[in-house]
């Protein structure tokens, strides 16, 4: 007699509960958290080096040449990057770190006039850090120009477009990278452990079917991946301006990578075979993320189109949309729909393979 839907839901919940408790006992959760932290720290090495080597960076825009600007360039305690357009100044600020501030020099500005120079910054820059940086730069400008120079931080902050490069593209890549690697490794490992310990045979003697076991493992993977993803969101909290796309990216990416892990777990019975297939699959999924750092304009159009069709690209784009102030609803829906479509395809293949085993 086949179990009812209610009984099957109880079986799936029991399998998930068992796997979650097993992961706690054998420290799988600890390994996942350490893995997530390691990936995040690795991604921060570049920005950290940049902050250490280029402290107190100023991005300066002046519509006209001025001799006092040349004097500021000679101050070795400041790193001054002068740009010729306001749009360029904003791009540089949004691709950098919070210690960068932008100074927009009014036409005809004279340092001895006492007029405050307007300062702009990215929305994620902390007020405390900005205040400290501005105070330091005011003191250095005053010392260099031998006259009191004041800076005035503008209330309106800069928000990036969804396709911004630099630091924001790196943050989006980190998010997808962490979930994809952990999901592709953790989820199939659950299924391999069931076979290795003999738990799978014991479960199949019970009313549980292969599909019930599959969904139980999926539920376990989703719980742990959501936890790891929440850690990433917490660390990126200051970057996120719109939480809707961030949460959509977390749920959509988690479901997608768990379905990939299930697919690997039902087609291969041992860790060695899974790793052999997972490695090239991860390279295929993660290559577009590194390409995003280079910029789509430097990639052939046909390759760009192929990259944009991959779920990892859509996940990174959706997550990076969360950094914008007014994200596009149609863009959010499109990216989320693509992630769910891939999830459905991978899950359907896993269920089909499971049914073949039941026969």
Image (tube, grey):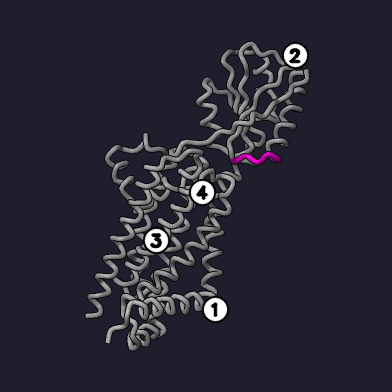
Residue designated by label 2: 112
Q: From this view, report whether residue 31 is shown above or below residue 256.
A: below
Q: Nearer the viewer, residue 313 or 79?
A: 313
Please tell me which residue is depicted at 65% across the width and 41% down the height of the picture: 126
Coordinates of residue 22 in the picture (x, y in percent)? 50, 78
Give the mark nearer the N terminus: 3 vs 1.
1
Instruction: Mark 3: give few (<14), some (14-19) or many (20+) Cα within 10 Å.
Output: many
Disc 4 from disc 1: Cα separation: 33 Å
Q: Are marks 4 and 1 in contact (CB under 8 Å)?
A: no
Quarter of the picture containing the C terminus is: bottom left
State which quadrant residue 239 falls in.
top right
Disc 3 from disc 2: Cα separation: 60 Å
Q: Which mark lies nearer to you, 3 or 4?
A: 4
Q: Which residues are magenta?
A: 124-129
Residue designated by label 4: 243
Coordinates of residue 122 in the picture (x, y in percent)? 58, 36
Q: Nearer the viewer, residue 101 or 81?
A: 101
For label 3, the SS is helix
Quarter of the picture containing the N terminus is: bottom left
């Amino acid at each position: 007699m086949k179990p009812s839907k209610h009984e099957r839901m109880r079986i799936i919940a029991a399998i998930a509960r068992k796997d979650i408790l097993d992961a706690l006992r054998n420290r799988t959760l600890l390994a996942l958290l350490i893995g997530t932290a390691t990936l995040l720290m690795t991604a921060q090495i570049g920005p950290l080096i940049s902050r250490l080597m280029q402290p107190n960076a100023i991005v300066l825009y002046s519509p006209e040449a001025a001799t006092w600007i040349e004097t500021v360039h000679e101050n070795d305690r400041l790193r001054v990057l002068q740009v010729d357009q306001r749009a360029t100044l904003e791009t540089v600020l949004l691709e950098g770190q919070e210690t960068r501030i932008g100074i927009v020099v009014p036409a005809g500005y004279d340092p001895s006039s006492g007029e405050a120079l307007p300062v702009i910054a990215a929305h994620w820059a902390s007020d405390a850090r900005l205040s400290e940086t501005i105070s330091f730069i005011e003191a250095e400008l005053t010392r260099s120009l031998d006259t009191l120079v004041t800076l005035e931080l503008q209330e309106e902050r800069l928000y990036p477009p969804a396709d911004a490069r630099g630091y924001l593209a790196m943050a989006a890549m980190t998010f997808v990278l962490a979930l994809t690697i952990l999901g592709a490794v953790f989820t199939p490992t659950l299924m391999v452990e069931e076979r290795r310990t003999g738990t799978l045979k014991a479960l199949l003697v019970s009313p549980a079917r292969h599909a019930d076991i599959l969904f139980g493992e999926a539920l376990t993977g989703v719980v742990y991946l959501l936890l790891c993803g929440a850690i990433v969101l917490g660390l990126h909290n200051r970057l996120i301006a719109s939480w809707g796309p961030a949460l959509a990216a977390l749920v959509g990416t988690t479901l997608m990578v768990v379905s990939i892990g299930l697919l690997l777990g039902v087609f291969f019975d041992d860790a060695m075979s899974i790793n052999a297939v997972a490695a090239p699959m991860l390279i295929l999924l993660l290559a577009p993320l590194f390409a995003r750092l280079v910029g789509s304009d430097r990639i052939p159009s046909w390759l760009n189109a192929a990259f944009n069709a991959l779920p990892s690209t859509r996940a990174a784009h959706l997550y990076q949309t969360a950094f914008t102030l007014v994200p596009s609803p149609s863009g959010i829906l499109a990216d989320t729909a693509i992630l769910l479509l891939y999830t459905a395809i991978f899950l359907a293949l896993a269920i089909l393979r499971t049914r073949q085993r039941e026969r």
